Image (spheres, rainbow, N blue to C red):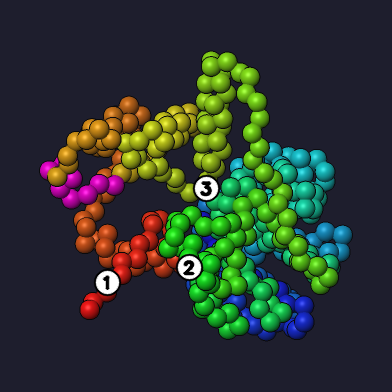
Amino acid sequence: MCGIAGIVNYKKDIKEQEKLITEMFNSLSKRGPDESGFYMENHVNLGHRRLSIVDIENGKQPMTYKENGNTYTIVYNGQIYNSNELREILIKRGFKFNGHSDTEVLLKAYVYYGQDVLKYLNGIFAFAIWNEREKELFLARDHFGIKPLYYTIKNGNFIFASEIKAILKHPDVKTQIDNIGICELFGVGPAHSPGKTPFKDIYELEPAHFILLNPDILYKKEYWKLEPKYHSDDLETTCERIRDLVVDSVERQLQSDVPLCSLLSGGLDSSIITAIASEKYKEEGRRLETFSVDYVDQEKNFVKNDFQPNLDLEFINLMVEKFGTSHRKIILDTPELFDKLKQSMIARDFPRNGRCRFFIFIIF
């Protein structure tokens, strides 16, 4: 997880606003505790907070690349799971690489493919690329919106960031509640209309959309849509196909230069992911780290029901024993959870995980 932020203003020189862009990306420090950096030109400021995972030395951001007399600069949050395949294609097209980071692959893939780069990406991402010659910003979000991205336009400033709190650092942006956004928050939360937030004039870039901004235009476009198709495979073929897809998806996400771990909850999802990751690690002579979260006196207070007839711990222990993972159990108490509630709300910028209710008391 990383954090990105930026400002584009075609009407005035903002090159000297180092303090402002620093305040913006520093508000994202929890997303990227390892490194920070910024890129500044007359009409654009880009900032980045990094959580170092792949190619720690050569994946620093903002990353700049010069090609045919032009300069391209990227700030990026995410991971491209098919970066190795894309790198091989680009090498055949004459590109050279300084390291093995997916950031470098994404930047050079954009230089080669332009907007069509989104057709070739398998991953989760939110990124911005500045084209210096054209004075053009390309902003994109992944197919399902796994990585967050927000933006606003104020007094000639196009402002974007991974979190709303960074946008609110800009002096031209006021903290105002949006009437429709707040109604959705209390009425249908955690769901909301695509693109809406509870804050006035601050928008979410929808999943599978990009924004193109230059001195002449600003437009937003959907680049992909999930479509239903007729399924003709028999049961056996379907099971094999699903298994292949799940295994491929998990193994692609194991690309990292730092240790990885998995959460074991006792459920099917975490168990399947742990099984695949553990087997892959064993092939490489490594042992997977796992952890689980439980609560004080859970065994004493647990009451069986039709929905949950067993403690999660029983299934967690089965997985640890079966796959020989290096396991760590974390025990939490209710006061500890309560103390962390405010921090979690600050991290999310607004309530998203539960339906809010109004209780109105009228006293005569």
- On the rendered structure, is 194 left or right of 129? left
Query: Which mark's residue is nearer the viewer, 1 or 3?
Result: 1
Question: Is residue 162 shown in magenta?
Answer: no
Q: Is residue 168 above or below residue 318?
A: below
Direction from residue 203 to residue 10 in the image, left or right: right
Residue furthest to the right:
68
Q: Nearer the viewer, residue 7 or 19?
A: 7
- Tell me the SS state at disc 3: loop
- Disc number for residue 297: none
Q: Amino acid at mark 3?
A: Asp
Foreground: 38 or 96? Answer: 38
Dot label at residue 361: 1
- Specify the farthest residue to the left: 300
Q: Which residues are magenta?
A: 293-300
Query: Which element type, helix, strand or loop, lies under badge 2?
Result: helix
The residue singled out by tag 3 in the image is: 257
Reading the image, the residue beneath label 2 is: 182
User: How many callouts does the rendering have?
Assistant: 3
**Of callouts 2 and 3, which one flags the residue occurring earlier in the amino acid sequence?**
2
Across and down, in percent, residue 237 comes to 57, 17
